[in-house]
Structure formats: structure tokens, C-alpha cells
Amino acid sequence: MLKNNKKILVIIFVLFIGCAKYKHIPETKPLEPKTVYEKPQKDLVLMGYTIQAGAFISVYNAAKLTELLRSKGLDATYFLAPDGFYKVRFGNFSEKIKAKEKALFLKKSGVITEFYIVSPEDYSVAKRKKLGDNYFRDKLVKTAESFIGVPYLWGGNSRETGFDCSSLSMTVYQLNGINMPRSSAQQYNTGKYTEKNNLQKGDLVFFAIKNNNQVSHVGIYIGDEFFIHAPGSGKNIRKESLNNKYYKKRYIGAKTYL
């Protein structure tokens, strides 16, 4: 009887050791799906000196100048200024004198007329340290909202399909002083991942529109489950809900850049 009891104790002890060794550790809650582009965060680059030119009533004229400057190898974009005119910004120079020399050359060539040099301290990102993150995020949202209703186009005979989604997010950030990469995949690689329930104004939201689990669309989050994006050729830039069945199904993650 004693021998049998010892055997039972030995079995219980072995089972106990086995459970301790292979104790099940509950899985942590997974993050939102990510694409194959996911890489460690890269440092964002602030804008230097930029040239601003034009004051157009028609967005098509602003797009035409934008395309002309792009054909000359200059990174250009148009936007609706607070005074109601469409204006064009282009270039990113390390020194003001270099920006001015380029602007004077283009003016002499008849490409532009009057111009203004935008300095790094003119951007809202330069005021972020003094006025806080909320100030900067509100500026991003206000800039994005100024594009609502603007046609999806570049103008001319560009190979570009229009003012596409990533160009919109790039422009919104550049107009506020951050030199955002051009493509949606590059933008996804640059920021720091944030969960959907932690989204803040100005964060970028990404989607896999082509159903291949890779980033192919991006929008600017503006709060209350809404984002602003350029939906496609022939359509105006607009506000959309993250709860929209189409985008909810294709949502792939979000990035913050602060």
C-alpha cells in the first residue's frame, strides 16, 4: 500500500513539473494588420526654404504651373490658400539664397512671375515646441480640410493619374513643415505605428485597396472616426468615415509622426 502511494506521489510530482515547464502563456492582443512594407521608424526631415508662386482663381491653372515645374525636376504642389487663391509651392533648399537664386532664374525664364520665399520658421511645425502638439495637429487638420472639394488632378499631360492619395498627405505635411515621402508605402515606412483606438488628429490611416495586404491608399485622420483623402481620378477630395464598410474592411493600420 505504501509502495503504491509513493508511485502516485511520483506521478503527481512529474505531472506538476511538466505543467510548470510548459505553462501556457496567453497570447497578447495582436496589433492591426501590417503590410510587407513595415520597417523600423525613420527620422522625419523638416522642410527648408521653399518658393511660393502664383495666385490663381482656377485650380486648373495652378495644376498647370505645378506640372510645368515638375517637368523641370522640381517637387511642386498646389494648394488653396486662406485668401481663396490657389498657389504653388516648390523646391526644398537648405539656404535662402539658393531658393532666391532659383526663383529669380525661373522668373527671368518666364516660368513664374512674383514669388515669395517660405522660411523654416514660417511653418507650424516650428511653432509646435512653443504652442504644443495639439496646435500642430489642428493645423494639419485645417490644411487637410482646405482641400475638400478640390479636384483630383495635376493638369497637363502628366503621367501622374492626379492629385493622388499620397500626394495629398505629403502636401498637407509639407505645408506644415515636414518633408513627407511621396508614396503611401514610403509614408507607411516612416511613421510610428499606432493602434486604431489611439488615433489622433493628423495621423495617417492606410488601406489595402488592391486586396493584396499591401499599402495602396492613405488618408489624413481628422478625428471622430473621419479621414480626408483623394478617392480617385475624376473625384474631388473628400471626407470619409473609417466605419464605412468599404474602408473598414480594407483598413491596414495607422502611423503617427510626432
Image (cartoon, rainbow, N blue to C red):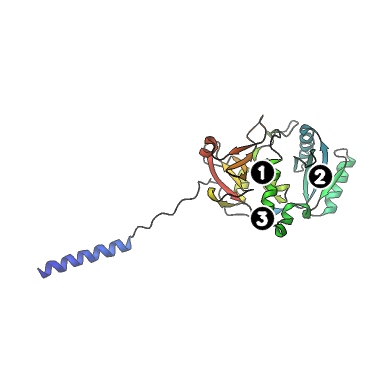
Disc 3 on helix, strand or loop?
helix
Crowdedness of circle 2 by 10 Å Cα count: few (<14), some, many (20+)? many
Please state which of the two labelled residues, at mark 1 or mark 3, is closer to the viewer: 3
Q: Position of residue 12 (x, y in %)?
A: 22, 64
Read off the residue under disc 2. 52
- Quarter of the picture containing the N terminus is bottom left
Estimate how packed mark 1 is, as few (under 14), some (14 to 19) or many (20 or more) residues with alpha carbons within 10 Å: many
Q: Nearer the viewer, mark 3 or mark 2?
A: 3
Type of the residue with mark 3: Asp
Kind of element beneath mark 2: strand
Whole-number angstrom distance, CA of label 1 to CA of label 3 = 18 Å
Where is mark 1, residue-wise? 169
Along the line of sight, the residue nearer the viewer: 151 or 19: 151
In this rendering, would 96 be left or right of 8? Answer: right
Q: Which mark is residue 133?
A: 3
Residue 147 sits in quarter: top right
Density class for disc 3 (Cα within 10 Å; few <14, some 14-19, many ≥20) is: some
Whichever of labels 2 and 1 marks the residue nearer the N terminus, that label is 2
Give, as a three-letter code, the residue at label 1: Ser
The residue most toward the front is 224
